Image (spheres, rainbow, N blue to C red):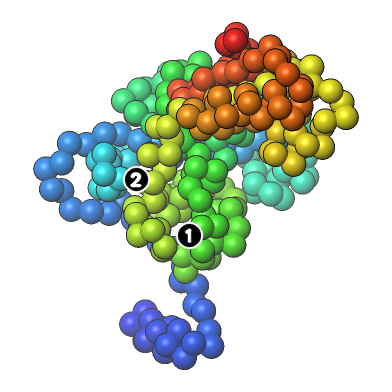
Amino acid sequence: MQSNVELETFAAQLEASGEYRVLRRLHPRIEFNPENGSTKKMGIVLDVETTGLDYIRDEIIELAMVKFEFASDGRIYRIIDTFNQLREPSIPISEKVSALTGITAEMVTGRTIDTQEVESFIDDAVIVIAHNADFDRKFCEQAWECFAAKAWACSMNEIDWQAEGYEGLRLGYLLAGAGYFHDGHRASEDCKALLELLVQPLPVSKELALRHLLDKARKPTSRIWAINSPYDQKDILKSRGYRWNDGGHGGPRAWWIDVAEEQTMEEKKFLCDNIYKGNFNFLWNKITAFNRYSIRINLEEVQR
């Protein structure tokens, strides 16, 4: 059997030829940067596996979290603790979900996720990061109220991966773009893989990935609701990036869009000039990291 040194030599030779790209197995670490006396904060990387995609009807079957220590400049120092628990749902786990997650009904039989342990684990964290926070946060808030009080960030949507040269947004694609592969699908392994990505500097901007993510998450945005917009204007709204809310999970039955806070009045003018042809009842939510991706956004009273 060839040694790791020999294999790495072969890999380097292949890469140097310009004809090959080599993916290296990701070996998760505990320590990332040496202690330098900086003020530290606690963050959480989180992933859930569920019985389906609807946070109202479906249920969590696995919760994995990795707690890490970081500084305000985005430098990650070390992993502090890990959390992984399975849960038996009240509805069946489909064959499709088992194939996707590797979790079977036998694995979760009689298992529960301890609420007090969840609350204790996230208590000192100032940020929760998920690689599709729009999915994970809703499920977590539905199951445990403690997640509603935390600031959240989405590593999939709040880093411009395309501008940094990546071709896809899925975690496996991003790892491959960084030169790695991992044994994915289980939530705990995905958490460790995501943390490795956040440690790295981004290839184009050279900014630390976590620093970029934190800066983006801190910026307030506005969710604008095009209430009672004319039906024949829907294509214009769609082409501008508006999405339809059917009211099934709360909020107005209307088209909506999220824009940077400083673009709120510009978007209002667009709606007045192009959709309503005059003044209209302007409705919006102010969104920060504390309610972004939350089930509470559509339930909160909109502002006029």
> Do we see residue 240 in this rendering?
yes
The quadrant in which the N terminus is found is bottom left
Badge 2 is on which residue? Answer: 211
The quadrant in which the C terminus is found is top right
Q: CA distance from mark 2 to mark 1?
A: 14 Å
Task: Compare marks 2 and 1 and give the one earlier in the sequence.
Answer: 1
The amino acid marked with disc number 2 is: Arg
Q: Is residue 77 above or below residue 168?
A: above
Q: Which mark is residue 164?
A: 1
> What is the secondary structure assignment of the residue under circle 1?
loop
> What is the secondary structure assignment of the residue under circle 2?
helix
Q: Is 170 positioned to the left or the right of 290 in the image? A: right
Q: Is residue 76 above or below residue 167?
A: above
Q: Is residue 76 above or below residue 113?
A: below
- Count neighbours of disc 1 (C-alpha within 10 A) and say few if under 14, some if 14 to 19, many if 20 or more: few
* Residue at figure coordinates x 51%, y 58% from the top left: 163
Residue 30 percent location from the top left of the image: 31, 51
The residue at the far left in this view is 37
Q: Viewer-proximal residue, 254 or 148?
A: 254
* Residue at figure coordinates x 38%, y 58% from the top left: 205
Q: Viewer-proximal residue, 100 or 252?
A: 252
* Residue at figure coordinates x 55%, y 53% from the top left: 171
